[in-house]
Amino acid sequence: MNPSRGRSLACLGVGLGWIWCAPLMAGTPQAPPPTVSKFFSTPAILVNGTATVGLTLNEQSGFEDATGVTVSDALPAGLVVATPSNATNGCGGTLTATPGATSFSLVGGTILTGKSCTITVEVTGTTPGQKDNTSSAPSSTEGGTGGPSLVATLQVLPPATLAKAFGSPTIPVGGSTTLTFTVDNPGPSALIGFTFTDALPAGLSVATPNGLAGACLTAAGGVTNAAAVTATSGSTSVSMAALNLAAASSCQFSVTVQGDTFGVKNNNTSALTYDFDGGNFGLIALSSAGASAAVTVNGPALAIAKTHAGAFQQGVTGEQYTITVSNVGTGATVGTVTVTDSLPAGLTATGMTGIGWTCSVPPSVPGPAALGCTSIDAIVASASYPPITLTVTVDPAAPPTVTNVAQASGGGDPGTAVVASDPTAIGAVSITQVPTLGGTGLAILCAVLALAGWMMARRRRTP
């Protein structure tokens, strides 16, 4: 029998040199029990973050495999098996690691003689604090139950946070407000190199002057290294770098932003990146979610439409276009609204008028000609100015199709002029052809007319 594989024997000397050997009773442990060591993949995670916990089991005897290996791990409060658990098992047997559970276990594993094997499970930190984790004493069929494992520690940290807020929920186009950022470190150790970028949404920009100010910019209080903040006037981004903030501290800074176009401006920062001072573990790189805020920029936005009815006719006076200017923005118009109309060749303006509009029509000038109307009336959002009627005369030689273009600008709309085009069909004048007579026909006609005249004269002379 190979003693490295069989059961252990007990032998006694019995007179005359005889030796009597018998197997020990089954279940009597002869090999030492397996040992276990424990580790976490990282020394620290954020609340709701994940880390891998691993157990390495060792067979100590060096002369037989350890079978029926069993070990369990009751996680400390604030740690649970992650979803998914992403468990790995290099020890055989059955590894149970149910997502959301507060423990995991191995049953029926095998460790080859003189070797080791490892199981791993991902865990989630649900509450902040130091998590000291000790597994049960491992056991095997051959070696029985050993001593407890070493303690492994995981720090679960509350994340650093960034809050942001606009000084006013609404501003007018061209108006400004403050945008304030608040950095908070609720954790038990310093944050190093706190960094983020805020790309402003379309229609917002850093004002002139930028109004940059705040405690994050000065090394005082909880700020151990002043932040480097970039907020260039006229640009569309704000960024922070190199802020060092002591444990359980916060700081603020603000910039002034202006509304360039109307609408709701949803502003989101990038993810926050920073290092956690892990003491003996050194700096630990972490990242947490950015911040969001919104401001509504109210202002006018002009729209223009131009229409006509049916086809125009060559040589006709009194054909008409209708021009309508609307406010499709979120705020009332401010100041003068100007409408211009460039008549194409073939049309001549004879009149341009509208209630509340002051219009100018060059007298008897055929197209192309620049016509204009202005209004200082204010109209609210989603409303329209009274329509403008443009009356024209169509030249007898006007082409079959012309395009009339009108545009509107002003009224506080910061955008470029809005344009409306109206292609117009021109009908030709109908001419009836009169037949003509040749020389012979004309002679006959003259003879007939002469004969008719002679007969009428003779009738008058007859009594």
Image: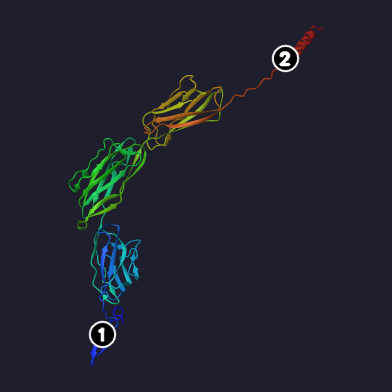
Q: Earlier in the sequence, mark 2 or mark 1?
A: 1
| In this picture, residue 23 sits left or right of residue 247 | right
Q: In which quarter of the image is residue 95?
A: bottom left
* Left or right placement of residue 189 versus residue 142 in this view: left
The percent coordinates of residue 197 (x first, y second) are 29, 45
Occupied quadrant, residue 448: top right
Depth-wise, is mark 2 or mark 1 nearer the camera?
1
Would you place residue 250 above or below residue 298 in this image? Answer: below
- How far is mark 2 from mark 1, CA to CA? 157 Å
Q: In terms of depth relative to the viewer, which is nearer, 112 or 208?
A: 112
Question: Of residues 266 and 225, which is closer to you in this image?
Answer: 225
**Residue sitting farthest toward the right:** 463
Outermost bottom residue: 16
Q: Mark 2 points at which residue?
A: 439
Q: Dot 2 surroundings within 10 Å: few (below 14), some, or many (20 or more)?
A: few
* Residue under label 1: 10
| Image quadrant in which you'd find residue 97 | bottom left
**Identity of the residue furthest to the left in this view:** 220
**Identity, as a three-letter code, of the amino acid under mark 2:** Gly
Identify which residue is drawn at 74% across, 16% down.
441
Left or right, 439 with reference to 418 = right
In this view, 260 is above or below 286: above
In the image, residue 424 above or below residue 330: above
The spot of residue 298 in percent (x, y) is 35, 38
Determine crowd level at label 1: few under 14, some 14-19, many 20+ residues with C-alpha closer than 10 A: few
Q: Which of 144 and 392 is in front in this view?
A: 144
Work out whether residue 75 or residue 67 is closer to the camera in this orientation and state it. Answer: 67
Q: Position of residue 36 (x, y in %)?
A: 26, 69
The location of residue 143, given as percent across then percent down, is: 27, 76
